[in-house]
Image: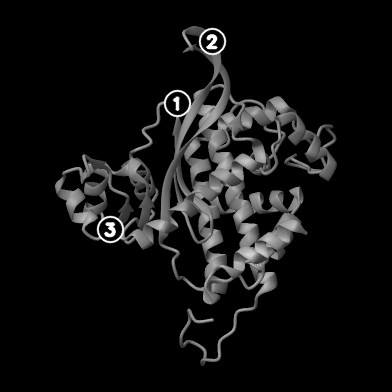
Amino acid sequence: MVDEILRTERNKLRPERKQAWSILRTKAPFYDRARRKAQVKSFEDMLELAQKVVDYLGPPWEQSTRGRPPFYNKEKMTSVVLTKHFFPYSFETLRAKLKEVRFDCRISPESKRKGRIPSKSQLHWVMMKIPEPYFQEAVRLMDEWAVDSHNALFGTTEVNKFGVDSTEIQCDPLEEALIAGHKRLRRTTDKLNFISRLVTNTISEISSSQHENTKDLRKLLKTRKEADRSIEGMEIIGDRDYDVEYNYRYAVENKVVVTIKPKLFAGKPYKGRYRRKVQANFSSKTYRSRKMVERPVGNMERRDGNKIHYKRPDMKKKGELLRAFAHNTKAYFMQEAWHEIFTRFSLLPKGVGGDEM
């Protein structure tokens, strides 16, 4: 009660137009309702969505005609691996969950051979078998599906606004380090660089490694361009870590609009032909929305503690992509929850003002 009284008194100090309409809920009155609907989604819902992704992308590898014929369906096994980080599952826990929902991974359900659920070593083998670009494409696909769901209800406004950011994630392997003049063991860390779509809170591109250059925006844009996604017209907001001349040059040459906070040396910005060209249109109002790019990292850290337990470099990269895929599926379920709360309508004739509410 004391806290509520203090909030009320503090609210009265603001100008009348800036006072909160509700002391307890000030910004997003429907957000909690949509989040509760999205959290209702179970492991079975995630598994069904993963199967749709695999049906769309196709099998991750071609089946060999030599050797013993396969017993498990590779598409079903792939969809199972895609669900691994929807909850912080180990392979053993994931297998137990498959048993609980009675998911049959066999090619032929009528087979007399027992064991419709693969072992944890087989699930691990499948994850190693799936190529890294397949996981990257699954992340992009969930981002695009979330955008399609958003556009169907709210229109296409601001869907081209992105943010770029970097972070570090803790790994299991230990390394020697000199701490306070003494040799100690500490956890290794991997660096993540990613582009997030602000309006849907989804990850569009991600790159990770132990020695990742977290200042390089070009790598993310090049990867996206190589995946047959258009980067022309993208509006990307980044902090001063990305204030590098080669980022500006690549953005200008590919018609990407960037808003990056400039670095200062002795009170003056750094020099550079493309830097001057871009910074001439810098908007502090646009830059304020950069804070939204930190939501995916915060969401994933809250779910699994921002830790990854793979040891091989290639498996760690795939693990990061699976974490991003799980985050995008949750954002997709959030967009679907908005459809259960709001109804899109228009008073205009059909075909006129398509993006109006």
Number of other residues with Cα within 10 Å of mark 1, as a class: few under 14, some 14 to 19, many 20 or more: some
**Amino acid marked by disc 2:** Arg
**Amino acid marked by disc 1:** Gln
In the image, taking residue 154 as reference, residue 251 lies left or right, namely: left
Q: Position of residue 75 (x, y in %)?
A: 64, 43
The residue lying toward the viewer, choosing from 181 and 315, is 181
In the image, taking residue 205 as reference, residue 305 lies left or right, namely: right
Tell me the quadrant of the picture where the C terminus can be found.
bottom right
Task: Give the image quarter of residue 96.
Answer: top right
Q: Position of residue 238 (x, y in %)?
A: 37, 49
Question: Which residue matches tag 1?
Answer: 210
**Count of all numbered marks drawn on residues in the image:** 3
The residue lying toward the viewer, choosing from 174 and 17, is 17
Residue drawn 37% across the image and 61% down it: 286
Quick one: which residue is furthest to the top in this view?
182
The residue lying toward the viewer, choosing from 293 and 354, is 293
Residue drawn 51% across the image and 26% down it: 189
Q: State the separation of the CA atoms marked 3 and 2.
A: 45 Å
Q: Position of residue 289 (x, y in %)?
A: 44, 58
Secondary structure beneath disc 2? strand
